[in-house]
Amino acid sequence: MSPLLLFSFVIGYFLLLLVVAWYTGRNSNNDSFFIGNRNSNWMLVAFGMIGTSLSGVTFVSVPGAVSKESFAYLQITLGYLIGYFAIAFVLLPLYYRLNLTSIYNYLSSRLGVKSYKTGASFFILSRTLGATARLYLVVKILQDAILTSFDIPFWLTTLIILIMILLYTYEGGVKTIVYTDTLQTTCMLAGLVICVIFILNKLDMGLGQSLQAMGNKGYTKIFFTDPNSKLFFLKQILAGAFITVTMTGMDQEMMQKNISVKTLKDSKKNVVTLGFIMLVVISLFLVLGGLLHLYAENLGGHLATVTENGKEITRYMIETNDATADKLFPVVALKYMPPLISVIFIIALISALFPSADGAITALTSSFCIDILGMQRRTDWSDAAKKKTRQRVHLVFAAIFLVFVMVYKWIDSPSMIGVILKVAAYTYGPLLGLFTFGIITKRKVNDAIVPFICVAAPLVCFFLDKFQKQLFGGFEIGLELLIINGLLTFIGLLSISKKATVV
């Protein structure tokens, strides 16, 4: 399909986002930007958060990984559901009771200012690394599919997309994002369903027949029972639960939208509903992954293992095109599907990109302004000065995103979802330890030492991960590294704590 025609659809879609942003962002202030004036509709938030939770990485990486890991990702998704219940009935009541704008203010009142700043800093680090990894993957696909034809360099493509995001989040923030995320999630899910239906029709199969064909290829295996494997079901379910608790419940971006809902009751409904919807949607992504592999085989494709930079990488060879796991869906959609489906794929991909990037930049701006600069406590700043500072911070984070996307381009990992989950294990572990310690104990910590504990725990985890074969033999540490990191942080905090004095 003509890159110019694809690009015109991208521009049209962006103009639609600008219209929504203009309409919803009118008369916005700092409260609108940070927490949507606590007036967001819970159903819109729940639906829009699907796009934020999934991102472009899920859109292409989860289907692409089916040939290697079958439906194992569903084990993690079952853990997600457990995590969402924990958020709804443990964390949300805490956040609403304290009437928080930034969830890290809880750490200040419970553990101390240094703990508060440490938690916020780890969020800023983690969300920056994770969001830019997601952004890189989608920008790379757009670059290869459209913008290379216009001789536009990769860095300029990234800059253009960041400017697009800034244009529709600059004024309204969360108030706008609640609506734009709803639109984008609708487009993403529509694209997913349409691609599934198209491939089923091309293969002349019903859903049941396709699942049987996938089963014959070994693609539909869900539960893995080898305790030494990183795909062992207990490891995956536990890791999924803790990933959700940390990457959603202890993440300012995700909670910023939840606490923008008017009441705690509605916010709980939002989170629990999201958990069940995610289970269905990710199941559909896995089915799509199996269908993509069946369709690729029908086109004459085959798996091949090649060595690049000393690492073995599995690629799908289709005629003269080859695709790693992350590229299988884009290659099939753009080269072996009709033009209309290619357009739908690009719009769905962009719809998966924007919710994860726009929310991240907005949440990072909020956290830095509130947690690091202490904007809410600055009585000597006028509202106009606060707004000007917030806008400058927003621009700075966009520039930081550009830099980190270029770093990921230099790294060029074949599967970005693995990179994102590994980054989360290292950077969200201290947050897990801090919040857990604050919630389940009444002890008082030596606040000045907390930052050192929170840095030491990920360093120990890096050592364990790096030398796990020498230390544990055949036992593989997978996503449970996050739990180990949180536990080490918790033990460290316990070692520098004492019983709280009862007044």
Image: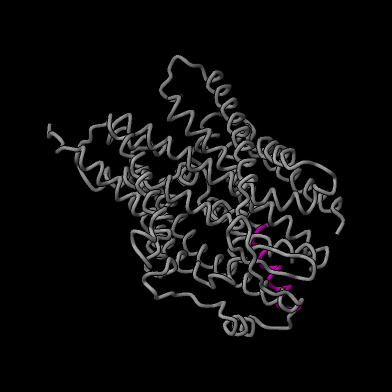
Residue 96 falls left or right of residue 389: left
Percent x, y of residue 7:
81, 49
Specify how the rendered protein is coloured: one colour
Seen from the viewer's position, the closer of residues 355 and 88 is: 355
Q: Quadrant of residue 218?
A: bottom right
Image quadrant in which the C terminus is located: top left
Seen from the viewer's position, the closer of residues 231 and 310 is: 310
Percent x, y of residue 82:
39, 62
Q: Which residues are magenta?
A: 188-202
Residue drawn at 45 percent across, 55 percent down: 271
Residue 145 falls inside the magenta stretch: no
Above or below residue 387? Residue 343 is below
Residue drawn at 68 percent across, 69 percent down: 316
Above or below residue 35? Residue 439 is below
Residue 199 falls inside the magenta stretch: yes
Percent x, y of residue 303:
66, 72
Above or below residue 404? Residue 9 is below
Percent x, y of residue 12:
79, 47
Q: Main secondary structure of the magenta part?
A: helix
Residue farthest to the left?
502
Image quadrant in which the N terminus is located: bottom right
